[in-house]
Structure formats: C-alpha cells, structure tokens
Image (cartoon, helix red, strand yellow):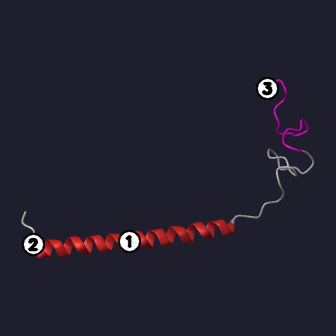
Amino acid sequence: MRLTRRHLLTAAGTATAFLATERVIRAGTAALGSALGGMRPAAQGTSTDRCALCGSPDHAMLDPRCPRSRPATMRA
C-alpha cells in the first residue's frame, strides 16, 4: 500500500479522536469516583468502639459475648 496524504490525514484524525475520547473517559471516571466517595456514609466509631463482626458498641471484636463470633472449639 502506498502512503498518501489521505492516509496520513486519516491516521492523524484517528489518533486525535482516540486521545480526545481517552481524556473524556478519564474525566468521567474521576468525576464518578469522587461522586461515589461523597455518597459513602460517615464512619460511626472506631475499631476500639465497636465490634467489627456485628457492629455493637457493647463489646470488641474478640469478645466471646459477640453473637456472631465462633465458639472457642471452632477457632483454628
């Protein structure tokens, strides 16, 4: 195939369209990521305040009083 001005202009136009599309996709992804981060609810305590298994503020995660903890015989 012979290289002509038409082929060069087509290649340049395709590359420009690709770069423009890539920038739009990156901007959209960044906007979506920041929007999703803003929709996340705020934390309701720390790991020292609440049980990570059931969310109760009455005990810590390794406390045997947790209703979701495994019995001592099942722990590895």
Q: Nearer the viewer, residue 56 or 19?
A: 19
What residue range appears in magenta?
Answer: 60-76
Which residue does the numbered mark 1 point to in the structure image?
21
Q: CA distance from mark 3 to mark 1?
A: 54 Å
Neighbourhood count class around disc 2 (C-alpha, 10 Å): few under 14, some 14–19, many 20 upward: few
In screen coordinates, is 76 left or right of 33?
Answer: right
Q: Amino acid at mark 3?
A: Met
Looking at the image, is mark 2 or mark 1 earlier in the sequence?
A: 2
Question: Quick one: SS at disc 2?
Answer: loop
Q: CA distance from mark 2 to mark 1?
A: 26 Å
**Percent x, y for residue 50?**
86, 50
In screen coordinates, is 20 left or right of 29?
Answer: left
Image marks 2 and 3: residues in contact by CB distance under 8 Å: no
Q: Residue at x 91, y 45 (%)?
A: 59
Looking at the image, is mark 3 or mark 1 earlier in the sequence?
A: 1
Most extreme residue toward the top is 73
**Percent x, y for residue 4?**
9, 72
User: Any magenta on residue 74?
Assistant: yes
In screen coordinates, is 44 left or right of 31?
Answer: right
Tell me the tag on residue 12. none
Q: Residue at x 44, y 73 (%)?
A: 24
Looking at the image, is mark 2 or mark 3 earlier in the sequence?
A: 2
User: Any magenta on residue 67?
Assistant: yes
Which residue does the numbered mark 2 point to in the structure image?
4
Tell me the tag on residue 74. 3
**Percent x, y for residue 35?**
62, 70
Q: Amino acid at mark 1?
A: Thr
Image marks 2 and 1: residues in contact by CB distance under 8 Å: no
Q: Amino acid at mark 2?
A: Thr
